[in-house]
Image (tube, rainbow, N blue to C red):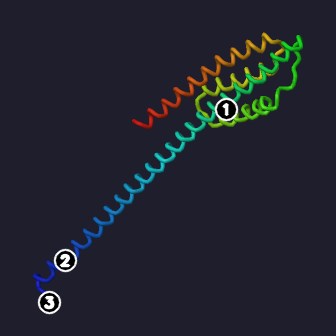
Amino acid sequence: MPSQDVWLPLASLVVGFLIKLVSDRVQNGWNLERERIAREAIVREQRLARKIEIQRQALLDLQEAAASLVRATSVGSFHDITSHRETGHWAKNRWPEEANSGHLIAQNKVARALSVIRDSNIREQANQIKALSAKVAMARSEEDSERGMQSLAAASEGLYHAIANALRTIDDSETL
């Protein structure tokens, strides 16, 4: 029968091997869990960065579309007013093609940008600009048209400030 001198080292070797095997499995499980958590955090950060970029671009698109809408409305209003001053009566004539198509395109661009924007205040202000623009387009007198343009100018300035504040907030949140 083998002596105790052989069994004890052999048993120690087997027990040590089994302990190391269990320890490696536990350590590997912990490493896999840490890697999974790190990957999920990276994916969350990438999604957040993408959402921020989409909002930033939508705000910039809205600002450009609103400015185009105000310009097209202004051209159309100017056409109506000059026509009224030439003829002496207010008649809704067809706007020049540039103003007419520009107005329609800008209204659509504003609507598209609004579909993405999360800020309810900005959405409300942009919808107000769309409504004021339509009101100018349907004005029943020169005075109505001029009042509408003044309201539109004031509303657009408010929208531009709100967009600028939102963009600053986005930029500030990225630098933190």
Rounded to the nearest angstrom, the CA distance separating label 2 from label 3 is 16 Å
Q: Nearer the viewer, residue 144 or 128?
A: 144
Residue under the point 48% across and 50% down: 43
Give how far across and how far down residue 5 sits, in percent: 10, 82
Please tell me how crowded label 2 is: few (under 14), some (14-19), or many (20+) other residues with Cα within 10 Å: few
Give how far across and how far down residue 79 sits, in percent: 80, 21
Please tell me how crowded label 1 is: few (under 14), some (14-19), or many (20+) other residues with Cα within 10 Å: many
Above or below, 107 against 133 in this view is below
Above or below, 156 against 174 in this view is above
Q: Nearer the viewer, residue 99 or 104?
A: 99
> Tag 3, which secondary structure?
loop
- In the image: residue 88, left or right of residue 128: right
Q: Is the Cβ of the residue at disc 1 closer than 8 Å to that at disc 3? A: no
Q: Is the Cβ of the residue at disc 2 closer than 8 Å to that at disc 3? A: no
Please name the residue that numbered disc 1 is placed on: 65
Give how far across and how far down residue 72 sits, in percent: 74, 27
> Tag 2, which secondary structure?
helix
Please name the residue that numbered disc 3 is placed on: 1
Above or below, 34 against 45 in this view is below
Residue under the point 61% across and 26% down: 122
Please name the residue that numbered disc 2 is placed on: 11
Q: Nearer the viewer, residue 173 or 154?
A: 154
Kindly identify the amino acid type of the residue bearing the numbered disc 3: Met
- Pick whichever of labels 2 and 1 is earlier in the sequence: 2
Give the label, 1 or 3, closer to the camera: 1
Which quadrant of the rendered structure holds the N terminus?
A: bottom left
Kindly identify the amino acid type of the residue bearing the numbered disc 1: Ala
